[in-house]
Image (tube, grey):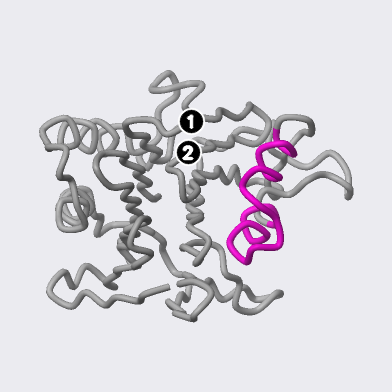
Amino acid sequence: MCTSIVINRKKTIVGFNLDILNMEHRVRPTDEGVYIEINDAKEGWMPLFGANNRGDFVAMPTCWPFDKRSNPVNETCRNIIMLDIDLLLKKKTFGEIKDIVKNEMIYSIPGVTFMSALSNKNGDVLHIVPGQGSEYYEKPEYKIMTNFSPYKHDKEKHDWMGWARYNKVEEMIKNTTEDFDVKDCFDILKAVSQTVCPTVVSMVFDVGDNVVYWCENRKWEDIKQKYL
């Protein structure tokens, strides 16, 4: 599960809830970025989500139900996880990622359809669904991604697809003002946080000020921050 939000009002504000089950995570703040890392049994700690000091943000919700078109067809396929890491660690630019997904097929790992919700300092957004397609949005008013394919919407059902979360986020955004700020974003993340597949990190990125805010395990009173 997961919820990704990008809102362009007076400020560009990015919000993300990481909802995972039975996976070890940590938040690692550095001068280069604030990374949410997952401890992989084979690779060790992997920086899969978060913000960097260039203004990029990486979110990677899982698509439910799984779509076999996201399975890699050979070892040379472009892997969405590696593209996300390359953007987060500034090995590639947002524009380079955009060109790659425009010209090449992007795949996930066998048996799991990971999606990407990427944004840059300008508030531009790139949504990627391996095996199905990608969409680029130039500084949209807002963009949301939960855990269903934007190409299928609610045509296929799954308990974790996040259709209700998506609609709740959109409803709340439409009732906000041009002064939308960090607190407003945390209010939305709190409203759609999860307990069954628990929300372990809630992160908000004030892109213009280059400040990342986050809390862990839904402890909304204990918000940390890092200036990048």
> As displayed, is residue 196 above or below residue 128?
below
Q: Which residue position holds label 1?
A: 138
User: How many numbered marks are there?
Assistant: 2
Q: Earlier in the sequence, mark 2 or mark 1?
A: 2
Indicate the position of residue 13 as horizontal and vertical percent values.
31, 50
Figure quadrant of residue 17? bottom left
The reply to whether the C-beta atoms of the residues labelled 2 and 1 are less than 8 Å apart is: yes
**Three-letter residue code for mark 2:** Asp
Report helix, strand or loop for mark 1.
loop
Image side of residue 14 versus residue 30, left or right: left
> As displayed, is residue 138 above or below residue 108?
above
Indicate the position of residue 134 as horizontal and vertical percent values.
60, 30
Q: Which residue position holds label 2?
A: 124
Indicate the position of residue 23 as horizontal and vertical percent values.
48, 70
Residues rendered magenta in the picture: 82-101
Q: Does 94 lie within the magenta span?
A: yes
Question: Which residue corresponds to the image point at 46% horizontal and 63% vertical from the top-left?
Answer: 50
Question: Which residue corresponds to the image point at 37% horizontal and 42% vertical from the top-left?
Answer: 160
**Three-letter residue code for mark 1:** Glu
Q: Residues within 10 Å of mark 2 (few under 14, many from 20)?
A: many
What secondary structure do most residues of the magenta stretch adopt? helix
Q: Does 39 lie within the magenta span?
A: no
Front residue of 75/57: it is 57
Question: Which residue corresponds to the image point at 42% horizontal and 77% vertical from the top-left?
Answer: 27
Report helix, strand or loop for mark 2.
loop
Question: Which residue corresponds to the image point at 33% horizontal and 38% vertical from the top-left?
Answer: 162
